[in-house]
Amino acid sequence: MAMNESPASPSSIDVTQVVAKSRNYWSTVLDRLSRDPVTLAFGAILLLILLSAIFADVLAPADPFKTSMIKRLKPIGTDGFPLGADELGRDMLSRLLYGGRLSLVMGISPVAFALVIGGFLGLVAGFLGGKINMAIMRTIDVFYAFPSVLLAIAISGALGAGIVNAIISLTIVFIPPIARVTESVTTQIRGLDYVEAARASGARSLTIIRAHVLANVAGPVFIYATSLISVSIILASGLSFLGLGTEPPNPEWGLMLNTLRQSIYVSPWVATLPGVLIFITSLSFNMLSDGLRTAMDIKL
Amino acid sequence: MFAYILRRIVYVIPIALGVTIIIFGLVHIAPGDPLNAVVPPDAPQETVELLIKAYGFDKPIPVQYGIWLGRAIEGDFGISFATGRPVAEAIASGVVNTLVLAVGAILIGMTLGCLIGALAGYFQGSWIDKLSTGFAIAGVSVPHYWLGLVLVIVFSVEMNVLPAMGMGPGGSREWAWDSEHLRHLVLPVITLSVIPIGIITRSVRATVAEILTMEFVQTLEAKGLRSGRIFLHVVANAAPTVLAVAGLQIGYLLGGSILVETVFSWPGTGFLLNDAIFRRDIPLLQGVILVLAMFFVFMNLVVDILQSIIDPRMSRG
């Protein structure tokens, strides 16, 4: 996980050269991406999932909350129910489309929050070093002593069910790994010659962080965070599956899996659909993260 | 090396204490009066007063923590709401049942992960390499609770060849080595093993690929060793890394099996946690999490020490 190789230190700190170089860098990244059909394909799938969740109210053929006792557990391909109906006779296709909203929000937002908090902690620890580094990193070590699923369930279990509580607990789960990666990258960059040079020439800490450290830390940490979204999607739906996240009747993929599980002997295949979407979403984030990492030439 | 081992053991103590602080804190992040979190709602008045005294809720929080920690070290995690029995009793049988699952899954994960990973790393770019990479990524991206459900649908609902839930006939809660219990083990173990297979395959492939670029491999080749023998050298060098990954995976599986246990109604720690969540039984929640987290810390320590014994270079870091 830790970076083994430090980025090559630029021989000159001429700002114009750095800017020219970075423009060149991004065109190289785009060029590499355009020649990677697998990453592009998964990116397109992800975009499709995002768009269908955003425009669920336009795309959904039926009201996702409308129950119907006579239409209960219709199999896939029933007239008027292209993906079947759930245990309360609600249209599965509509619920899956709407379900994407909550599942994606609950999966992505914890990583985004953790990126801000963990990134800040790691930056501070890595840049300042010394006792502050010790205090932050040793506290983080304690959270590392929990397997992530267990920590999420412990905090969520104590806080109780609810979307906000699930997001809080997952944010706490993802702060330590992000802080650790940020700290390790920051520590390496802090030791580079050009940062030393900036310091020697009298630049203040904040200026150094903004001008030299942040730009170099952002890439690797961002890529690392995108790979965590894949885990977060699975965990968020997992919490709902346990009854800790979303509460009924809200459509959410994990919760839908949980309620449909009771009726697998009547309507087995409909019950698997929400899981298929969780799988595809998680897989797509993983593949996209891998592809971006290769294209941006980042070693984590 | 002994100095290193000693240093590692000493280093674990503050981590373990930190873990207990977090778990103790769970009572205080639970909404409402912490008293409501540890006392059953229908408890008679004298029991409530007894518990206030026992937990020290009339004392400052650091003192409460001290009392709680002292009792936890003695194995007293309080009384479960759900059963009215000591939490420790429930945990003891749950841990054994979860271990059965986790050890089974890690054995499958080690065998398949090492085999596929080593072949993929040795024959880089071949079809087996591509297949293993795809499988490894799918393995870490799949929601295993869903995979369990799919396996149940295929093998229990559609084909009716394997049991869908429980650990043995008649809702057995005690593991036994007979054919019925083993039949119940198949689906949950396969479901749980998907994650370690993916992760071990990935790390074995990376380790083998890295070792193959090292100079000593070229030396062996130059000396005229056949590829089979070279492979053995590579395996010996990859062992410490693989061991570390596998050791950590056991810890992860103990914690991660909760969702799989829920799918299969497997009477282990995950099932206990589920019960604790459903009934808002905080003492049970704390007890189970504490035991699983401590086991994870302990596995980390064991892995580090074993690594330093196998490969003395590790202890010099």
Image (tube, coloured by chain):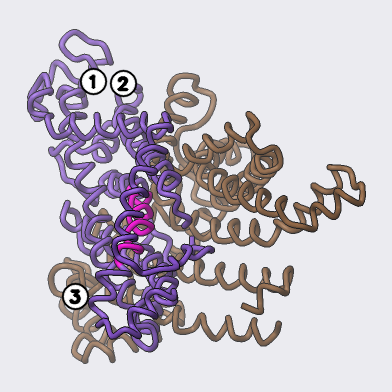
Chain colours: A purple, B brown
Q: Quadrant of residue A249?
A: top left
The amino acid at mark 1 is Leu
Q: CA distance from mark 3 to mark 1?
A: 43 Å
Report the side of B139 relative to B179 (left or right). Answer: left
Do the residues bearing badges 2 and 1 touch, measured as CB atoms within 8 Å?
Answer: yes
Viewed as shown, does residue B26 lie left or right of B93?
left
Quote the CA–CA distance across marks 2 and 3: 43 Å
Sequence-wise, the earlier of marks 2 and 1 is 1
Whether labels 2 and 3 share one chain: no
The residue that disc 2 covers is: A267
Q: List the residue tagged with mark 1.
A: A73
Q: Main secondary structure of the magenta part?
A: helix
**Which element type, helix, strand or loop, lies under badge 1?**
loop
Q: Residue at x 65, y 31 (%)?
A: B126
- Badge 1: residue crowd in 10 Å (few <14, some 14–19, many ≥20): many
Which residue is depicted at the point 58% across and 58% down?
B245
Return the chain for callout 1. A
**Few, some or many residues within 10 Å of mark 2 (<14, 14–19, 20+):** many
Chain part drawn in magenta: A214-229
Residue A38: mark: none
